Amino acid sequence: MDKDGGPAGKPVGRRVVLGVTALGALGVAFGARIESGLNGVMSAISSHDPTGLTGLLPGGGGFQFYNVASSVPYRSAQDYTLTVDGLVDRPSTYTLADLMALPQTTLVRDVQCVTGWRVPDTEFGGVLLSELLRRAGVKPEGKALRFTCFDGVYSESLTLAEAMRPDVMVAHQMDKAPVTRDHGGPVRLYVAPMYFYKSAKWLSGITVTDRVIPGYWENYGYDVEAWVGRSNGRTDAPIDGE
Amino acid sequence: MSESTGDTRNTQLDELRRFTTAERWVHRTTSALMLTAIVTALLLYVPGFAELVGRRRLLVVVHEWSGILLPLPLAVGLFFKGMRADMRSLNRFGPQDRGWVWRAMRHGTGLAGPAGKFNAGQKLYAAVIAGLVVVMLGTGLMMWFTELSPLNLRTGASYVHDWLALAIGVLVLGHIRMALKDPEARHGMRTGWVARRWARREHPLWEQELKQEKNSEPGRPS
């Protein structure tokens, strides 16, 4: 046996590699449960942390910030406009004040990202998409919607039937406060029954089209029909509806 | 530089061969990939950085590929004898490694007892980071190809991926800190050669081993 352990030494290295791998696999299997179990503890800790550093720890039940453009776009509450056009009888443009003057709805649902992170019981307030479409008057040949954003890059899509659901809205409130710039404010889309990439941030345009035009991530292979229950391979029971 | 023969070269410096060219390239390419993965991870995950940089699609692609390519240098390195020999020394723990990490934590690495070519801390670091890379690759692929697994497993995968990223960050920072404290160790990784004096101090069992090997080869020109 040589001085470095040599052939006769114990293969501790290999055991450690296999052990770490096994722990990782256990973490994947039970991570969802551990995460929801620790959520309360983590948010209790971060609410007493003035530095905000604990908010960066994984599983605090927080949002992750996603932006596909090169900088965070900005529209003030005064500058903001939302255009509804395409195959409609009455194309129109709404200011934030116009939207707030329409009938308001709130929805409390889990926000679910396709990669796995989830923010439970998030409240969104705003105008149902169906209300805006009713006001615009969709022409018979209108079959789908294309959403565009003032970041100039992002886009999304829904079929007309999906857009008419009572859990799909144009939101300007999140957790009883105006939607912040980072969360896609002043106005974002909220498609509760689907993965969160469908809920386009910084919404600036709704165009009624005769067919579905795939949105930003959908051009990179993500499902156009992003039901939390069904799409992207999931076969277990959906969280909501459908 | 004088001519070098095998594991030692006799200049005024009296140096020992620590790493082969293949091993140093494996280290260089692996660390470049690892740092790319870490930097893109920070830009994707930390809200402040993500807000500053945006461009999520580009960062995601760079992060995915730096991660998936991470084991490649080591895999190629296994075709080289020196690499395989050092992998064996990293894997095997001898009597001198028993309790070494504990003693090093309590009294410092200098008083933890003699070490072979790699001390027990280096061996553990190699094994833990290798295991972590396996898990990061697996969980990363689950988040990359979302159709492969049901949602509750993907939630678990992203949870594990996020926490282990933190662990890897701490380990890599520790690794860099140890290197910063030891210029001769850095010299060894840069050139492949280390001073005998350094080897005698940091890895005495290895230094003795090389000396014995050299003496047991008769008729070798010196």
Image (cartoon, rainbow, N blue to C red):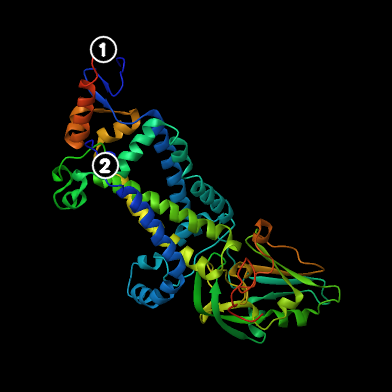
Q: Secondary structure at mark 2?
A: loop
Q: Secondary structure at mark 1?
A: loop
Q: Residue furthest right?
A: A140
Type of amino acid under label 2? Ala
Q: Which residue is depicted at the point 15% across and 46% down?
A: B112
User: Mark 2 — residue?
Assistant: A8
In the image, is A49 to the left or to the right of B114? right
Disc 2 crowd, CA 10 A, few/some/many (<14, 14-19, 20+): few
Asked if disc 2 and disc 1 are in contact, CB closer than 8 Å, the reply is: no
Type of amino acid under label 1? Pro
Nearer to us in this view, B187 or A71: B187
Q: Between tags 2 and 1, which lies in front?
A: 2
Q: Which mark is residue B221?
A: 1
Q: Which residue is depicted at the point 19% across and 43% down?
A: B96
Q: Residue furthest bottom?
A: A103
Q: Position of residue B145 (x, y in %)?
A: 58, 58
Is residue A178 among what the camera can see?
A: yes
In the image, is A213 to the left or to the right of A168? right
Q: Position of residue A60 (x, y in %)?
A: 41, 71
Q: Quadrant of the N terminus of chain B?
A: top left
